[in-house]
C-alpha cells in the first residue's frame, strides 16, 4: 500500500493512502503508485489551465495586467495584504467592483491577516477569499469578450464553458467523460482520471517549454510564487527553491499537480482521505524521487516533506513520513 505514515513514539499511528501518477506529453504512464485511473476533481489545481484564456484572448495585454496579477489568477492565496491588493488591482484595471465577485466572503487563511482584520474590527469579504484572484480573472475574461459578467460563475455562462473547453483540451478527455461539480468558491470544478490530470500538466509543461501561451502562465507562477500561495505555503516554497524547473498547484481534498517544464512531464497526486498534510509530504517526496529537487533542496523543504507533530507544550512527538517508492518505467525506484 502506498501511504504517508503518521509515526508517534516509533509506532505507526495512522496512514494516509496516496495515489501518484507521472506521465509524459503523450499520456504514457512512466511511473505510478496506487490507482492511476481514479476519477479525481482538480479543484483549485485547475487554476493554471483556467487562466490560459487570459493569455490566448489578449486579456492581459488589453488591460495591462502584470505577471504578479496573472500569478494571482492561478492562486489559492493566504489572503495577505499583497494578495488582496493585487486582486483589487485586477478589478480596478478591468473596471469592475468587488461586489461583482461571486466567491463567498472568507476569513483569510493567513493567521496574521485574519488577526489584523479582527483587530481593525473589519469583516472578511469576498476579496479575502483564497480564490479571489481566479474570480477577478474570470471577470476580466467576461468583460474582454463582451459577455455579461454578472453571472460568470454559473455553469452555463460562456466563462465556465470556456473553462471546460480548456480542461478537455489539456486532459484529452472527451466532454462526456469530464465530470463536473460546484467548487468551494461557487464555479465549476472538473473531475477526470488521475492519469489524465497528470497528462494535462505534462501538456502544459511541453507548451510552456516551447514558448506557447502556457509559457506566460508558468513564468508568472515561478517568478512570483508568493502570489500563488503565500507565507509558509508548500507551493510557494517549492517554486522559490526549484525556480522554473517545476510549477506546482494545490487542490482541495488532497490534490497536488506539478508540471516538469524541461522534462515535459506531468504529475498528479491524490490523497484518499483528502489530507493536506499528507499530500504536501507526497509532493516533496515525489519531486525528490524524480530528481527535480536535490537532496539539499528537499532538506530545505523538510517541514513540508517530513513535517513533525507537536503537542500543546510545543514538544516534537512524532512525524509524517512517506512509505512508497515511485517506480519509473522499469528503472526501479527513482532518485
Image: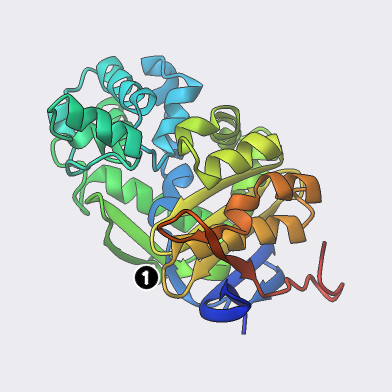
Quadrant of the rendered structure where residue 241 is?
Answer: top right
Of residues 334 and 180, which is closer to you in this image?
Answer: 334
Is 313 located above or below residue 162 in the figure?
below
Residue 123 appears left or right of 327:
left
Is 154 located above or below residue 74 in the figure?
below
Residue 287 in view here: yes
Classify the position of the C terminus by image quarter.
bottom right
Question: How far from the left and from the top, in percent, is residue 268?
Answer: 57, 62
Residue 256 appears left or right of 87:
right
Question: How far from the left and from the top, in percent, is residue 180?
Answer: 31, 64
Of residues 145 and 19, which is closer to you in this image?
Answer: 19
Of residues 13 and 22, which is closer to you in this image?
Answer: 13
Q: Secondary structure at mark 1?
A: helix
Of residues 64 and 21, which is closer to you in this image?
Answer: 21
Q: Residues within 10 Å of mark 1 (few under 14, many from 20)?
A: few
Question: How far from the left and from the top, in percent, is residue 174?
Answer: 45, 66
What residue is drawn where x is 54% and y is 28%?
Answer: 224
* Residue furthest out toward the bottom: 1
Classify the position of the N terminus by image quarter.
bottom right
What residue is drawn where x is 40% and y is 71%?
Answer: 177
What residue is drawn where x is 13% and y is 33%?
Answer: 123
| Residue at the spot of label 1 | 176
What residue is drawn where x is 64% and y is 55%?
Answer: 284
Question: How far from the left and from the top, in percent, is residue 259?
Answer: 63, 49
Amino acid at each position: 500500500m502506498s501511504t504517508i505514515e503518521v509515526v508517534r513514539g516509533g509506532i505507526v499511528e495512522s496512514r494516509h493512502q496516496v495515489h501518484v501518477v507521472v506521465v509524459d506529453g503523450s499520456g504514457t504512464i512512466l511511473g505510478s503508485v496506487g490507482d492511476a485511473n481514479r476519477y479525481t476533481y482538480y479543484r483549485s489545481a485547475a487554476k493554471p489551465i483556467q487562466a490560459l484564456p487570459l493569455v490566448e484572448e489578449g486579456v492581459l495585454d488589453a488591460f495591462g495586467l502584470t505577471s504578479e496579477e496573472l500569478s494571482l489568477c492561478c492562486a489559492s492565496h493566504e489572503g495577505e495584504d499583497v494578495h488582496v491588493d493585487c486582486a483589487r488591482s485586477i478589478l480596478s484595471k478591468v473596471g469592475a467592483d468587488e461586489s461583482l465577485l461571486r466567491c463567498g466572503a472568507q476569513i483569510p487563511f493567513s493567521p496574521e491577516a485574519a488577526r489584523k482584520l479582527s483587530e481593525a474590527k473589519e469583516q472578511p469579504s469576498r476579496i479575502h477569499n483564497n480564490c479571489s484572484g481566479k474570480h477577478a480573472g474570470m471577470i476580466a475574461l467576461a468583460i474582454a469578450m463582451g459577455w455579461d459578467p454578472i453571472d460568470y460563475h454559473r455553469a452555463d455562462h460562456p466563462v465556465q464553458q470556456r473553462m471546460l473547453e480548456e480542461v478537455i483540451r489539456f486532459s484529452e478527455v472527451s466532454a462526456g467523460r469530464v465530470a463536473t461539480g460546484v467548487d468551494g468558491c461557487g464555479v465549476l470544478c472538473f473531475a477526470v482520471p488521475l492519469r489524465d490530470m497528470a497528462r494535462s500538466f505534462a501538456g502544459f509543461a511541453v507548451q510552456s517549454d516551447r514558448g506557447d501561451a502556457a509559457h506566460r502562465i508558468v513564468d508568472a507562477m515561478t517568478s512570483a510564487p508568493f502570489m500563488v500561495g503565500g507565507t509558509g505555503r508548500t507551493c510557494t516554497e517549492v517554486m522559490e527553491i526549484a525556480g522554473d524547473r517545476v510549477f506546482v498547484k494545490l487542490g482541495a481534498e488532497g490534490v497536488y499537480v506539478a508540471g516538469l517544464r524541461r522534462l515535459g512531464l506531468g504529475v498528479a497526486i491524490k490523497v484518499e482521505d483528502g489530507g493536506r498534510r499528507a499530500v504536501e509530504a507526497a509532493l516533496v517526496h515525489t519531486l525528490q524521487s524524480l530528481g527535480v529537487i536535490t537532496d539539499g533542496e528537499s532538506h530545505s523543504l523538510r517541514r513540508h516533506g517530513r513535517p513533525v507533530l507537536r503537542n500543546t507544550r510545543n514538544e516534537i512527538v512524532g512525524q509524517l513520513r512517506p512509505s512508497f517508492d515511485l517506480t519509473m518505467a522499469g528503472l526501479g525506484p527513482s532518485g
